[in-house]
Image (cartoon, rainbow, N blue to C red):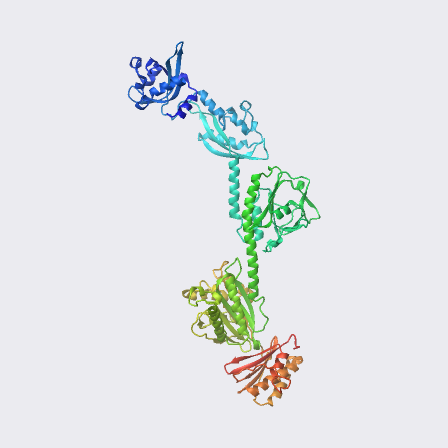
Amino acid sequence: MGTHEEQGVARQGFDVADAAPLLLDAQGLVTGWTRDAQRLLAYTSSEVVGRYAGELLGAEDARRVPELMERCRKEGGWAGLLTARHRDGAPVRLMVRITSALDERGPAQWLVLLSELGEAHGWDMSRDTLEQMVARSPVGIAIVDTNLRFVWSNPSLAQFGGGPPPHRLGLRLADIQPGLDAESIETQMRQVLATGDPIVGYEHVGRARSAPLRETAHMMSFTRLDDGHGNPTGVYYTVEDITDRHRARQRLALLDRAGERIGRTLDITRTAQELADVAVPGLADLVTVDLLESVLRGGEPAPGPLGDTEPVPVRRAGYRSVNGSVPLTVVDIGAVVTYPAESPPIRCLRTGTSWREEKLDPLGEAWAKHARGGQAAIFLELGLHSVMIVPIRARGVTLGVTTFFRRHRQEPFEEDDLNLAEDLVSRAAVCVDNARRYTRERDAALVLQRSLLPHRLPEQDAVEVSACYRPADELTGLGGDWYDVIPLSGARVALVVGEVPGHGIDAAAAMGRLRTAVRTLAALDLPPDEVLAHLDDLVARSAREEGVDLGGEEADGALGVGSGCVYVVYDPVDGACTMAAAGHPAPAVVMPDGSVTFVDLPQGPPLGVGGPPFESVELALASGSTLALHTDGLLAAGEDWAVDADRGRLRQALERGADSLDLHCRTVVDALVPDRPYDDVALLMARTRLLGAEQVADWDLPADPAAVADARKTATRQLSEWGLEELAFTTELVVSELVTNAIRYAAGPIRLRLIRERALFCEVYDGGATAPHLRHPRTTDEGGRGLLLVSQFTQQWGTRFVPEGKIIWAEQSLTDPSP
């Protein structure tokens, strides 16, 4: 046995009534043996008296006897554990206490008290020892009878309320602690009495009468007490204060909820509202989140400190109250709150430090005067008595403030509450800042997107058009798909749908370059296959200039490499439709009777990757036919093996029809595309029209200078029939110059055509292969002013080549006939 163990044994009370005494002399010989000792070890007195005490012990303890006798002589006694040998040889574990038996000549012999431990790991406790244990225990302990009335309790129970032990006797829990939820505790006692099964670790949370403002938590355990026949006599229970542990657990749970619920979106206002929702009611009864206006717009807060005298306007971005309804004196979400310059919220905004007030002045005006009849929010009216203000800071910048209030009977905010609030707000601040930066980038990206896609489709009479665009990147709303409708000369129109590999702002930028290039090429009035050929050259040349390996993986999407495009030109005069494709699905055609076919269009290679030349096809479309140009995101996956199935689904969606083309376009996309598509989707639908015979007039002219005058007169008569006499002078000039040029410089047949649509088109066809050039003649030159005059008196003019020659055309506005 070690020294500390021996000292522990020595301090315990020793019940003499349960001990077996014997006597030893100064040399350790047994001089007295009692019946109790005989009962304990089975040796008779004659067998033991006169023998050395060590002979009765185990070998290890026998060697200690001289040492123990020496200690007894020096210290006047000894107490500890020893192992004796029973008469039958079995070891007997004993608790031993040795004290001196004094006589007039000094200590002549020693009194030894033996107590058997049996199977116990310690030693039997006397009643005195047990009473000391329960009386001095910091844990509250009590015993109630079967009627749940107190019959005993230790002094430590008084710290949990209800007074000292004598005051509890004969009373129940509700009698001594009114206001406590005694019913739930007594329910546990009744269950233990009924089942006999102990209840361990029951947590009771409530408010004590002595501290009604502070929530407390206790850990309780209940055990049934039975008599010798197994009948219940009462309940023994213990109480331990775990308020600090409970509050720490609540704080961790609150922070866990904050991590799960704050920042689930990249919306600034929603993030601010999530912060308020998390904090109520776990931390506060009322929470407001106010952000600087520049933050809500996605911008950086203004540089420099806030003014010391100027009020600072902020916007209410989040609010939550335990009442569930906003008091009339509190501003709505999104409304402006102007705090006085000297108010605590503005001080927190300026300094970036938190502020706490345990007890508010109940008659003090609130910091913000709200525009509801000029009424000021009074703390007394709202029942607010304690407040914390925590600035919302991220990356060293203050974005706003969060204000926490407590109302009515809750305890005031403590320093731990402020630490928790700062931790909570700091987590939310990162989310708010991310949302702010995302808002800024998204707004910039959307401005780019809006500048690249058509704001509205142009007005023209060739086709009725509708478009639907759905990006795969729902966060930014950006994608690489695009569509366009481009009016051309002669009342014709170009329809374009294309897509760039990838998503997001890079794809949108590449798409913008391609769309601009297509518009530039369309202005040249080139056939569809030549437009795609020039576009292919442009993409490949740009990639090479940027050092992109056209055969490598990095070429995918770079500067438009690998993009797809379909280019369609429709002529409403005769219904001719010419188209070509570069790595893009062929359009579908909805016939006037509702049947659907797919154009057999040769597939050229994607742009910029090289391959065989592009091919055009031409078909005639009846009036009322609908062209459906789409990107491959409209179909399932764009895999070759799934083409037939994808086209089948598209055919079914197109055959359903709708009351309007806009509705039909949206219905097709909704039927084929999920809410979160795997790829960007663009669908352009164009319903064809044919110009009436009364809108087109043409004449064959001989290659004779005398025909110029006849052409002027013929054109003037036609304008009179159309009611366009105010354009007669300009049209005569245009016809004269264009026909004269054709007769003078071209060969083959000459044809004059006038088209009245939203503009007046004058076209002169000849068999020549060279285009005229606009010149700027000197004053002394006798000629060369024809096309210069045409450019001055018309909106625009140009040349387009056809298989048999060329057409020189000029356009005059019908809404503004003046040049």
Foreground residue among 197 and 111: 111
Q: Is residue 555 above or below residue 404?
A: below
Foreground residue among 389 and 753: 389
Foreground residue among 3 and 634: 3
Is residue 82 left or right of 362 when viewed as pictured? left
Is residue 582 left or right of 332 when viewed as pictured? left
Residue 668 appears in the rendering:
no
Looking at the rendered image, the quarter that the N terminus falls into is top left
Q: Is residue 460 above or below residue 212?
A: below
Residue farthest right in this picture:
374
Foreground residue among 312 and 504: 312
Residue 249 appears in the rendering:
yes
Residue 753: image location, x then y, percent: 58, 82
Is residue 819 left or right of 166 when viewed as pictured? right
Residue 21: image location, x then y, percent: 37, 15
Q: How many marks?
A: 0
The residue located at (39%, 20%) in the rendering is 79
Looking at the rendered image, the quarter that the C terminus falls into is bottom right
Residue 749: image location, x then y, percent: 54, 87
Residue 24: image location, x then y, percent: 35, 14
